[in-house]
Amino acid sequence: MSADFWAGYTSGALGILIGNRLDVLKVRAQTSTSSTHPVTTPQPSTNLQRFTALFRGAAAPVLGYGALNSILFMTFNRSLKLMDPSIFDYTKLAGVDLGKIWIAGAIGGLTTFVVSAPSELVKCRTQLGVDGQGSSYAVFKDIWKHGGLRGLYYGGTITSLRDAFGYTPNLYGWYFWSYELSKRLLLSRQADPFKAPTATDVLISGGIAGVVTWVSIYPLDVIKTRLQAQPAWHPEVQGLLSADGAAPRRAPNSLEIAREIWRTSGFGGFYRGVGICSIRAFFVNAVQWYAYERIMALFGGSK
């Protein structure tokens, strides 16, 4: 397979492993309000359980996000190449219009929907222990049992909107744009804009890109998390939870959740946990971009 496939897969999986614990804290912060259903996460009792708890919910995104990153980078590179045939190396885009880079990133984001939506759903519910399960596979089986293929794409619309216009954990329109802009600004001090950036240049650019893009789409991520974290998200359970013969309670949709956040927490409710998210975004994306650039340099940036 092509170099950008393996570079994307490896860097994506590595980023998930590095940032998973902070991602768990972010998800808990996003759902911790008195207006939402309480979520009980099983507490680890042994040293081994405490260690494995650091990676709670990581299995689904490691497998899914590795594939997602591969699709993302390959689609981004091919789309950009179609818009600008002069590209000779996917890691050296100094002469490419930033608008084209944004469009290619957005296209890449939309193509990852088939992987990102179910991966995000399983990850979110595993991290919060919503279904009383401690593993991604157990959560996956529960979702499949009650909702089938359609159930795996619960919250898919808001996820696709978030992915097309920002990042998740992954890297899309604004993500590629801000990374390239940051790298160009850092490289502007040298005469040759196509000279390979230093490790520091890549790490700083990747970190900045991660923070900028996460903050830009954070409200959508909060809504998405609240939507997917609802304890009674499938119709069968909603019916069983109905009391006194009342009609089953319908789970609120994305717009209704947004209204509830505004009513109970105001503007700040849409940025609950953004500090933790920004710290995670900087380190994860710094390492992720560094791994991508190094692998591409090793195997050939244009192959």
Image (cartoon, helix red, strand yellow):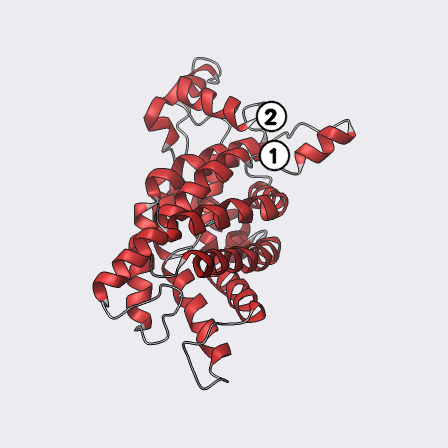
Tell me which label, 2 or 1, sits earlier in the chain: 1
Residue 249 placement (x, y as % from top left): 42, 25
Residue 154 placement (x, y as % from top left): 38, 33
Q: Are marks 2 and 1 in contact (CB under 8 Å)?
A: yes
Secondary structure beneath disc 1?
loop
- Residue 160 in sight in this render: yes
Residue underneath mark 2: 134
Residue underneath mark 1: 56
Label 1 crowding class (10 Å Cα cut-off): few <14, some 14-19, many 20+?
Answer: many
Mark 1 belongs to which amino acid?
Arg
Q: Residue at x 45, y 42 (%)?
A: 65
Quadrant holding the N terminus: top left
The dot on residue 280 is: none
Q: Quadrant of residue 153?
A: top left
Q: Residue at x 42, y 47 (%)?
A: 6
> Is residue 59 positioned above or below 113 on the image?
above
> Is residue 130 positioned above or below 287 on the image?
above
Mark 2 belongs to which amino acid?
Gly
Q: Quadrant of residue 49?
A: top right
Label 2 crowding class (10 Å Cα cut-off): few <14, some 14-19, many 20+?
Answer: some
| Foreground residue among 46 and 231 | 46
Residue 80 placement (x, y as % from top left): 28, 62
Q: Residue at x 51, y 63 (%)?
A: 206
Secondary structure beneath disc 2?
loop
